[in-house]
Image (cartoon, coloured by chain):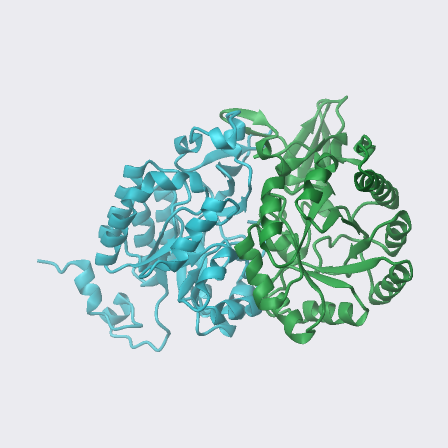
Chain colours: A green, B cyan
Amino acid sequence: MELICPAGTPAALRTAVNAGADAVYCGFSDATNARNFPGLNFSRPDMREGIDYARRRGAKVLVAINTFPTAGGQALWHRAVDDAVAAGADALILADIGLVDYAARTHPGQRLHLSVQAAAANPDAISVYVRHFGVRRVVLPRVLTVAEIAAITRSVDCETEVFIFGGLCVMAEGRCSLSTYVTGQSPNMNGVCSPASHVAYLEKDGTLASRLGDFTINRFAKNEAAAYPTLCKGRFKTELGSGYLFEDPVSLDAAEVLPGLRDAGVTALKIEGRQRGRAYIEGAVRGFREQLAALDAGRALPASRLAAMTEGQSSTVGAYRKTWR
Amino acid sequence: MALKEPALKELVPRGMTLKEMALGISVETQESMKLTLGPNLFNWQPDVWRDFYFRIADEAAVDTVAVGEVVCSKRMPFFEEHLPAVIERLTLAGKQVLVSSLALITLERERRRTEQLALEDGLMVEANDITCMAHLAGRSHAVGPFMNVYNEATALWLATQGARSICLPPELPLSSVATIAAATPQVDIEVFAFGRAPLAISARCYHARLHKLSKDNCRFVCAADMDGLSVSTLDDERFLVMNGVQTLAHLCTNLIADTDDLAQAGVASLRLSPQHCDMVGVARCFRDVLDGRISSEEGLAKLGSIYPDVPMSNGFLRGTMG
C-alpha cells in the first residue's frame, strides 16, 4: 500500500519524501485547497521545485484543488488545475463536479483523484465520477467501516485511498457548514474550518474558555489541557446531559486496522495534517513506514508510537469500527 | 357571498399580483416566485406525518411538495405505508410532488432503495446525493439542497443529466445564487428560505450517543424531539439542533424580507423546510408577501408569532455567519 503524506510547505514536502513517503499531497496558497491557512501552501515556483525534488527521489506529488469553486470566480480554480498540470503533478485531487468536468475535458490523460470532500460513499456514487470523468482513484469519506471499504474496493473500477492518521472529521466531509454558521468561513467555499482568526481563549474564575466566533466551544479547569476549539469537538449541553456530544478531542490512528485495509484491497493510505510541522510529518511517516514494513514481512505490528502526536494525546479508529456510529 | 380565495386568485393574470390587479397596474415583471415545501427532516410519528401532509395538500399555498426520508434510513419503514396516500392527496390537490432521496448513502439496503426510487416510473425524484446520478442520468429530476452545487459549471453539468430544478445549499451567498441562476435559464433555481438550516450529516447518530445507545439499537430516541433536540453552549446560549445523524442551526433561516433581491437574482422558487409549527401559516405568509398582500415587515412579524422563541436569520444569504 502506498503511503500518502501531507505537506503544507516545501520544507515539509522534502521532509516527507526523505522520511519515506510514496507520495506527497499539497496545494496552492489560496482558496483552491481545503487547508487554506495563513503562511501555508505552495507558490507556483514552489510547486514546480517540489515536484522536481520528489520525482528525483522516486516520490509522487498529488495536488489538492479540493474546495468548491465560487460561482463567477471559477477562473482561479481553472488556473490552479492548468498550473498543476503544467508543473507535472502526478495527480490532481478534486471535489467539485464542475471542476472535475473541466479538468477531464481540458487535460485528457491527466490522472484525477476524487477528494474526500466529494463524499462519494458508495460504489454508485463513485461510478458516476469514473464513468463521466475517468477518475482513477477515490479518497473514501471517513464514514465507512473496514468491511464497507472492502466491499466498495471490490466493486469499483478505480483505486481506493483511505485516511489512517491525523485530524478526524466527525461529519461527512464536504457536507458540513458548521464553521460557516459560526464564523462565516466555509470549509467548502473558503477551505477553512474553525479558523484561528476567530479563536479566542478567555480566563475567568479559574477556568479557561475556548471560543470560536461568538460561541464558547469548551471550558477547561486549571489542570486540564486546553484543546483547540474545533467546532465538532467541543463540550455542549442538552436537557439530557452535557459533554462531548459529537466527538471527543481525539484524532484518528488506524494503525491497528492496517491488516484489514490491506486485505480490503486499498491502494493508498493517507496521513492528514498539511497544517502540521515537520516533526509531525517526519514522525508520522517513519512510524507508518515501520508499521507497513512489519505488515509486508508478516511480522506483528509494532505498538504505535504516534500517540504523542495526536490531538489531545488520544486517538480513535473512528468509523472504521462499526460501534463508533 | 365572498369569493373563496383560490377562485379569486385564478382571476389574476399571470405575472400580476392581486393588489396590482385591484389597482389596475399593468406589470412587466417576471412570474412571481413559487413555493416548495421541503421534506420533513425530523422523526415524526407516522400518523402525525401523514396528517401533516394531508393538511398541506388541503390548505397550503405551495406549488411543490417534497416527501420522503432524507436523514436516516432507519426511519423509513414507519411512515412509508402512508406514502402512496400522501402522494395521491398532494397530486390531486394540484401539487407537484418530489420524492427526496437520502443525503448520505452507505449501506447496501440504502443503495438498493435509492436505485429503486430513481428507477420508479411516474415519480419525480429529488436527488440529495450523487448516488442518484448513477441511475437518473437522462431522466428529469430535481436536485435537493444536500448536493454540493456551488457554481454554474456544476449546475450546468447537472442540467445535462436531466436536472429541471436545483435547490442550492443553504450556505450560498446571494452573489453565487444570482450567477448560477443567470447561467442556467433551463433550470429552476430554488433557495432555502425558511427553516433551520441543515449544517452537517454524519455516520454517527448523536441522539443515540447522547442516550448511550448504539446506532443499530437506537430505540428511535430521536422521535421524542419533533423539532430536534436543542444543543447549548456551556454558557447556556442556544447553538445547534441535533436530529439523529444530522446537525442543524439553532437559528431559523428566514428570507421573507429578501424576496425582492431573490426575484432579481432570478430565483424561481423558495423552499420552506418543515419545522414543528404551523407550516400552512408559514406558506400563507410567504405567498402573501410574494403577492404583495402584506409587507415583508408584516410577514416577518407574522412568522415570528407562528414560530416563536427561535431567532430568525438571513446571514448565509448575506455572506456573513449563518
Asked if residue B172 lies left or right of residue B80, the reply is: right
- In the displayed structure, would residue B53 be above or below residue A65? above
Asked if residue A261 lies left or right of residue B114, the reply is: right
Residue A57 found in image quarter: bottom right
Q: Residue at x 80, y 37 (%)?
A: A298
Task: Depth check: give the residue in front, A87 or B316.
Answer: A87
Q: Residue furthest left?
A: B1
- In the displayed structure, would residue B80 be above or below residue B93? above
Q: Residue at x 70, y 54 (%)?
A: A34
Task: Depth check: give the residue in front, B165 or A110.
Answer: A110
Is any atom of residue B308 visible in this view? no
Task: Depth check: give the residue in front, A318 or B156.
Answer: A318
Is any atom of residue A263 visible in this view? yes
Q: Residue at x 60, y 63 (%)?
A: A130
Which quarter shows the C terminus of chain A?
top right
Residue A81 found in image quarter: bottom right
Q: Residue A214: horizontal and vertical position, in percent?
A: 62, 41
Q: How many marks?
A: 0
Task: Depth check: give the residue in front, A197 or A131.
Answer: A131
Asked if residue B293 lies left or right of residue A164, the reply is: left
Asked if residue B160 lies left or right of residue B307, the reply is: right
- In the displayed structure, would residue A319 be above or below residue B14? above
Q: Residue A140: horizontal and vertical position, in percent?
A: 64, 50
Q: Residue A168: horizontal and vertical position, in percent?
A: 68, 41
- In the displayed structure, would residue B262 be above or below residue A12? below
